[in-house]
Image: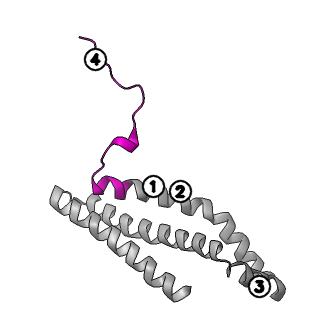
Amino acid sequence: MSKKRPKHLELWNIKFPLPAIVSGLHRISGALMSLAIPFVLFALAGTLSSAERFDAFKSCISHPLIKLALLLVLWAFLHHACAGIRFLFMDIHKGVDLPTARLTAKIVMAVSLILTAVIGVIAW
């Protein structure tokens, strides 16, 4: 009668539905934005302090890895905003049925990625 149950849940072996992925990415994007706050504030303070620091900031963000990091923070902001709007509608019981939840999850993923690509191309 005793079953061998796993001691640890292997998340990488579970196929999550898209609404669960959007929910997880919403949490990850919020954490990423929270971690980015000190760096953004440091950069803002540096750019406002003097012309030399502003020039140093401009040369720093011209590096491709820094641009990718900023693009990741941009995606985090856009995804968090789009998913947040979706969750606000779900809080007032709009779009909670399964087909609508799946559709809105696809819309959130598409809109956040498209906006990130468009703004990234414009800013790159």
| CB-based contact (under 8 Å), mark 3 and mark 4 | no
Q: Which mark is residue 27?
A: 1
Q: Give the residues in magenta.
A: 1-23
What residue sits right under mark 3 in the picture?
Answer: 54
What residue sits right under mark 4 in the picture?
Answer: 3
Nearer to us in this view, 19 or 62: 62
Q: Quadrant of residue 18?
A: bottom left
For numbered disc 2, what is the local secondary structure?
A: helix
Q: Quadrant of residue 88?
A: bottom left
Nearer to us in this view, 92 or 30: 30
Q: CA distance from mark 2 to mark 3?
A: 28 Å
Q: Position of residue 19 (x, y in %)?
A: 29, 56
Q: Position of residue 87 (x, y in %)?
A: 32, 61
Residue 117 magenta? no
What residue sits right under mark 2 in the picture?
Answer: 31
Q: Quadrant of residue 79?
A: bottom left
Q: Position of residue 30 (x, y in %)?
A: 50, 59
Q: Residues within 10 Å of mark 2 (few under 14, many from 20)?
A: few
* Sequence-first tag of 3 and 4: 4
Give the residue displayed 28% in from the left and 70% down from the top: 107
